Image (tube, rainbow, N blue to C red):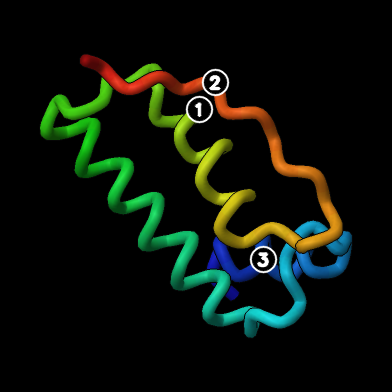
């Protein structure tokens, strides 16, 4: 089992992810978002130290269970 699928299954078990989205789709979407963040960092669109913060902001909002509160965004894009 891939690492991201294991994380998705655990997130579903803990009711942290939206159960209406199939597990494999969660895994693919999470991988796609992580890849996008990586591309931004490599292209200097976002500094490397913000990559983790971006992931912590975007992934729960996209894939989180509807009954869980959303985390506060602390990433501010460069002007």
Looking at the rendered image, the quarter that the C terminus falls into is top left
Position of residue 55 measured from the top left corner of the image (x, y, whole percent): 49, 40
Q: Would you identify the image quadrant in which residue 43 lies?
A: top left
Q: Give the residue at x 60% y 50%.
A: 61
Question: How far, Cα to Cα, is label 3 from label 2?
Answer: 24 Å
Residue that mark 3 sits on: 8
Q: Is residue 70 left or right of residue 41?
A: right
Mark 1–mark 3 CB contact (< 8 Å): no
**Helix, strand, or loop for circle 1?**
helix
Residue that mark 1 sits on: 53
The correct choice, above or below, for 39 with respect to 63 in the image is above
Q: Give the residue at x 88% y 60%.
A: 14
Pick whichever of labels 2 and 1 is earlier in the sequence: 1
The correct choice, above or below, for 35 with respect to 8 in the image is above
* Between 60 and 77, the one nearer to me in the picture: 77
Pick whichever of labels 3 and 2 is earlier in the sequence: 3
Pick whichever of labels 1 and 3 is earlier in the sequence: 3
Position of residue 53 measured from the top left corner of the image (x, y, whole percent): 50, 27
Disc count in the image?
3
Q: Give the residue at x 38% y 17%.
A: 49
Mark 3–mark 2 CB contact (< 8 Å): no
Residue that mark 2 sits on: 74
Q: Would you identify the image quadrant in which residue 44 lies?
A: top left
Mark 2–mark 1 CB contact (< 8 Å): yes
Which is in the foreground here, disc 3 or disc 2? 2
Q: Is residue 10 left or right of residue 46?
A: right
**Helix, strand, or loop for circle 2?**
loop
Position of residue 2 measured from the top left corner of the image (x, y, whole percent): 54, 69
């Amino acid at each position: 089992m891939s690492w991201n699928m294991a994380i998705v299954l655990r997130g579903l078990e803990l009711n942290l992810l939206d159960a209406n989205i199939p597990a494999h789709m969660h895994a693919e979407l999470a991988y796609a978002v992580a890849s996008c963040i990586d591309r931004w960092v490599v292209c200097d669109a976002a500094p490397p130290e913000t990559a983790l913060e971006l992931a912590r902001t975007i992934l729960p909002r996209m894939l989180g269970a509807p009954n869980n509160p959303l985390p506060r965004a602390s990433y501010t894009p460069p002007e």
